[in-house]
Amino acid sequence: MNVPFYEKLWMWAAGILIVAFLATIIVGVAGSALAPPSHVETIDPTKVWADPRFANRGTTSDEHGTTVVAVAMMFAFEPNEIRVPAGRPVTFRLTSTDVIHGFQIVGTNGNTMVVPGYVSQFTTVFRTPGEYLIVCNEYCGLAHHVMSAKLIVEEAGP
Ligand SMILES: [Cu+2]
């Protein structure tokens, strides 16, 4: 059978695309199906309070930047008030002691799921000093709507 050149070209192009799409699905499913969206660091959710990584909750700063360690639980964040400097990278490290929670800093790009068994981590910079509301944006139970905290972004020193 004599298949014209352009017909062959398009068949090969379509075949290559199908293989590429399948490869994307396979790599995506195999690589990240059960992992949270940030890096993968695990923790026993029943032993969060005894874990040294979450022993000192709150804000610490050194020459590399600022780190905030916090725990999400039904129906609060600990600590409930977080202070960070403006204009500097702030890394949040969060985990949950019970169910899936959310950690959304309203009006900023700070937003992550907090999944029991994992440490969620993200880094962001707050340009504008002020008070920000932190809400849980994953329905976590009857008092989900009262689960909030406050972020205070302070004018950084020189
Ligand atoms: Cu919650």
Image: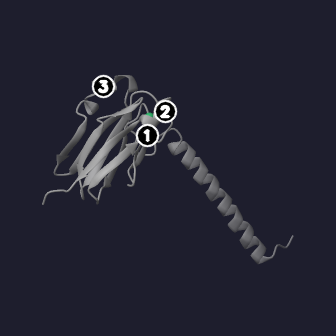
Colouring scheme, one of rainbow, by chain, secondary structure, one colour = one colour
The residue lying toward the viewer, choosing from 3 and 79, is 79
* Label 2: few (<14), some (14–19) or many (≥20) C-alpha neighbours in 10 Å: some
Q: Amino acid at mark 2?
A: Cys
Residue 57 against residue 129 in the figure, above or below? above
Residue carrying label 3: 49
Say if disc 1 is inside 8 Å of ligand 1: yes
Residue under the image location 66 percent in, 62 percent down: 16
Reading the image, the residue beneath label 1 is 136
Residue 10 locus on image (x, y percent) = 73, 71
CA gap, disc 2 and disc 3: 20 Å
In the rendered image, residue 112, in percent from the top left (x then y), is placed at: 42, 45
Task: Say what amino acid the circle numbered 3 marks.
Answer: Trp
- Spatial distance from mark 2 to mark 1, Cα to Cα? 8 Å
User: Percent x, y for residue 56?
Assistant: 22, 33
Q: Up-down: is 28 above or below 119? A: below
Residue 115 in sight here: no
Disc sitting over residue 97 in the figure: none
